Amino acid sequence: MTVLRTLIMLALVSGPAAVMAEGSPAPKDSYLYIGWPIEGSVVSAKSFRVWFGLRNMGIAPAGVDKPMTGHHHLIIDAPLPPMDEEIPADKNHVHFGKGQTETVLKLPRGRHTLQLLLADHDHIPHDPPVVSRKVTFTVR
Amino acid sequence: MRTLIWAATLVAFLVPVASIAGDTPAAPDAKVSIIWPYDGSTIRGGKFWLRFGLKNMGLAPAGVEKPFTGHHHLIINGELPPFDEEIPADETHVHYGKGYSEARVVLPRGRHTLQLLFADHNHIPHDPPLFSKKITVLVP
């Protein structure tokens, strides 16, 4: 019985480790999307605007710990990073830690993908992760 | 008649300058806009998500003091309030102090005007003040 209790305790303690995201909680009805460009669109090689859509959650600059907020990360031509770690900062993972809700991008001609991933004050995705659909579009 | 038009134009330009703005500086080239709905839109049922556009600045929840951030305020069927005071909070002036970048709006039948006004952690507009064009929507 004691062994069983210990096992249950162990399971409870180790439980959260099995969950992918360890970030701050996100509301169930949060919705993240890329407002522009939309799937299949064609944008200019000079530059194009990207705007970030987020419903039922707020934006806070990186480092600001407020419940039900986060900041945007734009994933360019790359798969989603691990959900239980800080999002890397490189040319494929652009952080918007100043609380921006839109940006202007310049990409080489060709097909590209964009995906948004919201993360908390520590740059760790929320639990559950708040992630947009991946958009494929053409730069011409 | 021409003199009258000139006088009106002059007043239109002078008024915003004459109003004293808050102490929090706005970023250069910052711009607030209403991404959706477009000016003159007809919205059946009167329920929609209003998307807030913000160029070259970031969002922060009310009370969070970070340079070049603020939060949105929606003015429904009203005029811009004084720029050197806290924006009032009533049914004409809706605050989005959680750092929202869009909001569900429900309007009754009729013609309505919508305008965004950005403000700092103390709900006081920036210097210079950042506000969108005033748009008109029709709910049939």
Image (tube, grey):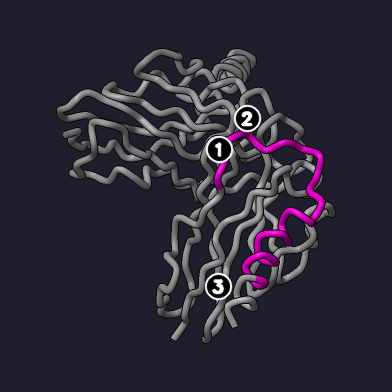
Query: In the image, what residue occupies the spot 59% across and 36% down?
Result: B58
Q: Nearer the viewer, residue B17 or A57?
A: B17
At a point 58% along the width and 33% down the height, the residue shown is A99
Name the mark on residue B29: 1
Q: Which residues are magenta?
A: B7-31
> Which residue is label 2 attached to?
A61
Q: Chain of mark 1?
A: B
**Quadrant housing the N terminus of chain A:** top right
Mark 3, chain letter? Answer: B
Picture quadrant of residue A103: top left
In the displayed structure, does residue A62 sit left or right of residue A93?
Answer: right
Same chain for the residues at labels 2 and 3, yes or no? no
Q: Is residue B133 above or below residue A139?
A: below
Q: Amino acid at mark 1?
A: Asp
Find disc 3 in the rendering and name its residue: B106
Residue located at (59% from left, 13% from top)? A3
Which mark's residue is nearer the viewer, 2 or 1? 1
- Residue drawn at x 55%, y 45% is B31
Q: Is residue B55 magenta?
A: no
The quadrant holding residue B68 is top right
Q: Are marks 2 and 1 on the same chain?
A: no
- Indicate the position of residue A130 as horizontal and vertical percent values: 46, 37
- Could you say where residue A13 lies in the image, as x and y percent from the top left? 60, 18
